Image (spheres, rainbow, N blue to C red):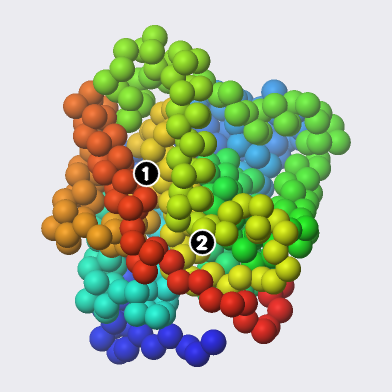
């Protein structure tokens, strides 16, 4: 595959934006007060783990029980060590600023290469996309002032994305993807899309080893807890029926609390989530070949990098659109992807920028308001419809598998 040529102006633009972003992060750390939300609870949970506790039902922090898989504990145990038992907040903020900048840099490379390959976007459009990615006030706040574990999970996911899209190393990509899941389970929203990508590249049973890699990572990381208290670990680390607090919902504030916590809403949203995944898979992801043909195909199909990004980002965005609740920190799950998703649509540029601005503004409204929730839902639906109705030439480029065997 020939290398993608960025050109000196675009490289200089990307580097300039990253330098400016680093300056902004340092300004925030030095001039804006840190907000304590979950960091102390993380440190309390990690302290119990370091002290020898292996029963997930017994590990708690100031904000409640531990509800993240084991990878979270290992990474935040290291963070606790390098921040003097979690007391050096300035050091923690600096690390999270580095996480933010690494995420930006990775995505510049991934999205820039995918855009330039086969001429999907002009360099001017790529430059606009990079600017939008750097302008989010809320993302800066979530990374540098809040220190959420979502930020760590998303960095690991974006590393996995790099190997799926740029280097064709699917084994390493699956390891990193599973590591991301082990920090926070929101990464599973990408799983339907990842399965579609794997089935194209490794039809039928050839996909099984890659699924086994993902499962093996989870087993290895959770082994100390699975050997001691297996049911406790499985119940809390992968708590799919977790209850969320109405007070923090950003997307359903216009509902009353009894409706928000009802099972009818939960099952209705799950149903719409599954239906939407099916519709996108059939219309946008399968190249009209159908799911069964991927299971029985004899030859690999090489997906264009932009199509891989579309599948994974849209899979995640569908899950967010039909999420039972969205908290402010959940913006890290897709905030960096919004510019790509919007620029992939056929909407006029001013509409794309208006939608980006609208979503960004909603996440900057505090406390959550009913009117802002309605606006967010409408913006999500408009973007989802625009993505669904993409013409064939904008939606995907699929070629025969290359001759090099992926690993």
Residue bearing mark 2:
287
Residue in view at x 33 percent, y 58 percent? 390
Q: Position of residue 204 (x, y in %)?
A: 73, 58
Residue 176 placement (x, y as % from top left): 63, 59
Point out residue 112 in the picture as x, y percentages from the top left corner: 38, 74
Q: Nearer the viewer, residue 256 or 76?
A: 256
State which quarter of the image contains the N terminus.
bottom right
Measured in 3D between alpha carbons, the distance from the residue under mark 1 to the one under mark 2, in whole angstroms, is 30 Å
The quadrant of the image that shows the C terminus is bottom right
Furthest-left residue in this view: 350
Q: Is residue 219 above or below residue 2?
A: above
Dot 1 lies on which element?
Answer: helix
- Whether residue 132 appears in this view of the structure is yes
Disc 1 residue crowd, few under 14, some 14–19, many 20+, Cα 10 Å: some
Q: Quadrant of residue 252?
A: top left
Query: Between disc 1 and disc 2, whose residue precedes?
Result: 2
Q: Quadrant of residue 123?
A: bottom left
């Amino acid at each position: 595959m020939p290398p993608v040529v960025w050109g000196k102006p675009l490289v200089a633009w990307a580097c300039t934006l990253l330098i400016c972003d680093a300056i902004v992060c340092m300004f925030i750390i030095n001039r804006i007060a840190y907000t304590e939300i979950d960091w102390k609870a993380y440190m309390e949970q990690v302290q119990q783990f370091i002290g020898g506790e292996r029963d997930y039902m017994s590990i708690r922090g100031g904000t409640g029980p531990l509800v993240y898989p084991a990878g979270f504990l290992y990474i935040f145990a290291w963070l606790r060590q390098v921040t003097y038992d979690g007391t050096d907040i300035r050091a923690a903020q600096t690390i999270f600023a580095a996480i933010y900048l690494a995420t930006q840099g990775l995505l510049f490379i991934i999205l820039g290469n995918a855009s330039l390959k086969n001429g999907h976007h002009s360099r001017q459009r790529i430059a606009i996309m990079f600017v939008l990615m750097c302008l989010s006030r809320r993302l800066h706040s979530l990374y540098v002032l809040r220190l959420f574990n979502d930020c760590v999970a998303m960095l690991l996911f974006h590393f996995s994305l790099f190997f799926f899209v740029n280097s064709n190393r699917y084994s390493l990509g699956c390891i990193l993807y599973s590591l991301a899941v082990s920090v926070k389970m929101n990464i599973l929203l990408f799983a339907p899309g990842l399965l579609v990508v794997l089935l194209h590249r490794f039809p039928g049973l050839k996909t099984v080893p890659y699924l086994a890699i993902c499962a093996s990572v989870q087993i290895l990381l959770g082994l100390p807890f699975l050997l001691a208290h297996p049911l406790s670990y499985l119940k809390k680390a992968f708590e799919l029926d977790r209850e969320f607090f109405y007070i923090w919902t950003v997307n359903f504030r216009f509902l009353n609390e009894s409706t928000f916590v009802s099972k009818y809403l939960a099952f209705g949203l799950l149903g719409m989530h599954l239906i939407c995944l099916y519709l996108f898979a059939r219309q946008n992801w399968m190249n009209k070949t159908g799911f069964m043909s991927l299971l029985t195909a004899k030859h690999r199909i090489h997906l264009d990098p932009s199509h891989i990004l579309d599948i994974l980002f849209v899979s995640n965005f569908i899950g967010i659109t039909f999420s039972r609740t969205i908290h402010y920190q959940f913006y890290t799950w897709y905030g960096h992807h919004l510019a790509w998703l919007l620029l992939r649509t056929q909407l006029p540029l001013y509409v794309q920028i208006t939608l980006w601005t609208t979503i960004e503004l909603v996440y900057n409204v505090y406390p959550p308001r009913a009117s802002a929730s309605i606006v967010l839902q409408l913006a999500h639906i408009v973007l989802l419809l625009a993505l669904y109705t993409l013409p064939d030439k904008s939606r995907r480029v699929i070629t025969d598998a290359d001759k090099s065997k992926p690993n």
